[in-house]
Image (cartoon, coloured by chain):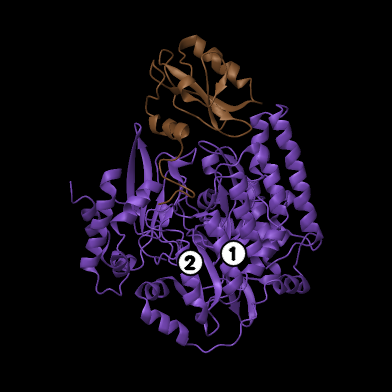
Chain colours: A purple, B brown
């Protein structure tokens, strides 16, 4: 894991001191809200429906026990005993008072954390594959490159006032678990003739204008990455629209300019960079950052674990959890484990202080001090010995953290919706809970198989409804909540935007409509091995749309 | 401004609500011009008087942030198309959260 050097520590400390002064001036009336708002947004502070919300950066979703314990301490002391993990691998505190936020940021800085790049029109926190460094299918560990991009982008003076926010995601695996094609820039690390480089996708995004990114370049060599990114950012900064907030994201620029012309602009900008302004990342610096992400010292173990197999045979619930929540590790005898934050009837992505402390302790005992946040709002212990899984499961179960639903129908991405958000039109959380209750039976869930339902409470799409296999969008109809269903979205390497199925449904209609979609799938699939999204793509949307409105 | 809310007719009964700047909590303007977190004490305003009160509220930015009109009945209960939003602002999320047993 990356560790702060003296410069990192100094800039974070200075930022805390600076913001403390700004908060003080806001509270004494010297700064008015319109003046203060851009300053607070540069420090992760939003004003939500009934409180301030502080979004804390978790770069590329990686935590260690000390950081997670500090987040628990903050939730306990300054909030209401819980935090909410987000789709960009960050955490949000929903009730923190403005007067306390400088102290919270001070506390975070003591464990090398901050809230920089979590809001405002800057390059945001870089996200990545939550199995980075552990996954069998990765070309390399993408985290060093996320960190290099973070260091380049943090306080980059040229990109502090972009037309709009800017999100970058990085993956190194063929199975895209970082949703790179719905990011402003998506980077896919490739290896070609022994050389590392980046396939660059640009102009993806969700919100009110969902767009799948355009592939801009097949292979940018690693030493040229930052200069190439800088060329893209300069083109966006110069030509991106500033006259209309809703047209300001790079996806609009790429769409309006056309992919070929946009590529030409980037190539021209790149070619115009002088040697003096090029970063031309030195290999020594690349190596230095990579050294922070050396794999943990994993003892060699046999590929099969007698301890694990005995425990599975004795406990069907444990066996299910292993079947559903385990992801293969690149080293034999180990696994990556998803800790679901989606218990039936719970709040997607929420973890209490007690749960955070349990996960921190288990990461120390069994997980080589490594914890990840997933973009699907779960946690991951990426390096666990198979022998340790029974003990790990027992402790997780005791903390309400052993739900076996990773990737299944109840593992939904759900935005905070109108229960928290000042922008929302409708509630998301209760709809998610209603659907979870409909599919609570774990056998039923497993039979359905992989199926992503994503729920957003407004068109801003924080709940990623556009890329859910089934998407649900809350809309306001003269003060009443309604929900629009879409079909066929996906966020992976076959990324697609879902199609709206038809008229919006009332809250009461939604769970049964979802059930009819899924029952139709179960009737029409070639076998249980054919996932929902493949059946949908094979047959088209018509039978599923008919199922939604079958009650009409 | 954080909140752009639906326009209300001058004669529609309305309250003035905002966020307490220091804590972020929801507050309402009482009839005697005090900011209160007790919704039962909110003042009901109409017409020019309501506009004057809102302008006064906007001049108190050190105390409150982003004051705006919310529709209420003449008796001061939440009304209109933003009833759900304002009820959640007043009462908090509609789902149990945090350490509340599920």
Q: Is residue B50 above or below residue B102?
A: above
Residue located beneath label 1 in the image: A360
Task: Name above or below for residue A288 compared with residue A228.
Answer: below
Label 2 secondary element: helix
Q: Where is residue A326? Give x, y as percent.
A: 45, 74
Give me the residue at 52% from left, 89% from top.
A302
Of A320 and A483, nearer the camera is A320
- Most extreme residue toward the bottom is A302
Question: Element under label 1?
Answer: helix
Residue corresponding to mark 2: A396
Q: Residue sitting at 64 percent across and 31 percent down?
A: A34
Q: Earlier in the sequence, mark 1 or mark 2?
A: 1
Could you tell me which residue is drawn at 27 percent across and 62 percent down?
A: A540
Quick check: A503 above or below A72? Answer: above
Q: Depth check: A447 or A393 in front?
A: A393
Asked whether, in this view, residue B80 is left or right of residue A353, the answer is: left
């Amino acid at each position: 894991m990356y560790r702060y050097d003296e410069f990192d520590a100094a800039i974070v400390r200075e930022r805390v001191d600076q913001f403390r002064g700004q908060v003080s001036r806001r509270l004494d009336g010297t700064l008015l809200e319109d003046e203060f708002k851009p300053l607070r947004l540069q420090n992760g502070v939003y004003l939500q429906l009934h409180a301030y919300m502080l979004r804390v950066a978790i770069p590329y979703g990686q935590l260690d026990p000390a950081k997670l314990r500090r987040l628990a301490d903050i939730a306990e002391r300054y909030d209401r005993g819980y935090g909410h993990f987000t789709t960009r691998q960050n955490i949000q505190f929903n009730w923190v008072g403005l007067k306390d936020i400088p102290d919270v940021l001070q506390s975070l800085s003591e464990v090398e954390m901050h809230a920089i790049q979590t809001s405002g029109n800057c390059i945001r926190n870089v996200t990545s594959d939550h199995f980075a460094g552990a996954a069998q299918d990765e070309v390399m560990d993408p985290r060093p490159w996320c960190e290099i991009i973070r260091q380049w982008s943090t306080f980059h003076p040229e990109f502090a006032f972009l037309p709009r926010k800017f999100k970058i995601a990085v993956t190194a695996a063929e199975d895209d678990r970082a949703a790179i094609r719905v990011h402003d820039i998506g980077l896919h690390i490739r290896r070609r003739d022994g050389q590392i480089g980046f396939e660059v996708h640009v102009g993806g995004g969700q919100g009110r204008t969902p767009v799948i990114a355009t592939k801009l370049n097949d292979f940018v060599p690693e030493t040229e990455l930052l200069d190439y990114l800088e060329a893209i950012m300069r083109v966006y900064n110069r030509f991106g629209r500033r006259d209309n907030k809703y047209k300001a994201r790079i996806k609009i620029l790429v769409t309006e300019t056309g992919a070929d012309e946009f590529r030409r602009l980037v190539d021209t900008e790149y070619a115009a960079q002088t040697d003096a302004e090029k970063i031309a990342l030195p290999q020594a610096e690349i190596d230095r950052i990579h050294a922070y992400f050396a794999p943990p010292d994993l003892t060699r173990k046999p590929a099969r674990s007698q301890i694990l197999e005995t425990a599975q045979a004795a406990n069907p619930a444990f066996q299910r959890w292993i079947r559903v929540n385990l992801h293969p590790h690149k080293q034999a005898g180990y696994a990556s484990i998803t800790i679901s934050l989606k218990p039936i009837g719970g709040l997607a992505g929420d973890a209490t202080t007690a749960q955070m402390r349990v996960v921190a302790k288990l990461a120390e005992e069994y997980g080589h001090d490594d914890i990840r946040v997933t973009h699907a709002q779960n946690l991951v212990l990426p390096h666990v010995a198979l022998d340790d899984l029974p003990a790990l499961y027992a402790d997780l179960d005791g903390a309400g953290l052993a739900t076996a639903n990773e990737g299944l129908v109840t593992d939904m991405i759900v935005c905070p919706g109108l229960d928290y958000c000042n922008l929302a039109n409708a509630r998301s959380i209760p709809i998610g809970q209603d659907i979870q209750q409909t599919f609570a039976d774990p056998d039923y869930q497993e039979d359905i198989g992989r199926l992503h339902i994503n729920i957003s409470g407004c068109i801003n799409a924080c709940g990623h409804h556009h890329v859910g296999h089934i998407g649900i969008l809350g809309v306001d109809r003269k003060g009443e909540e309604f929900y629009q269903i879409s079909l066929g979205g996906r966020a992976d390497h076959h990324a697609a935007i879902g199609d709206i199925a038809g008229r919006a449904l009332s809250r009461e209609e939604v769970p049964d409509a979802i059930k009819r979609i899924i029952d139709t799938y179960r009737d029409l699939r070639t076998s249980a091995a054919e996932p929902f999204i493949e059946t949908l793509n094979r047959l088209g949307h018509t039978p599923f749309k008919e199922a939604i409105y079958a009650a009409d | 401004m954080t909140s752009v809310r639906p326009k209300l007719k001058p004669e529609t009964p309305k309250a003035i609500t905002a966020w307490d700047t220091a804590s972020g909590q929801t507050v309402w303007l009482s009839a005697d011009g005090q900011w209160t977190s007790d919704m039962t004490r909110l003042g009901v305003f109409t017409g020019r008087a309501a506009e004057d009160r809102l302008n006064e509220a906007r001049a108190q930015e050190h105390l409150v942030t982003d004051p705006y009109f919310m529709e209420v009945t003449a008796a001061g209960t939440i009304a209109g198309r933003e009833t759900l939003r304002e009820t959640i602002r007043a009462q908090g999320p509609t789902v149990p959260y945090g350490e509340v047993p599920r």
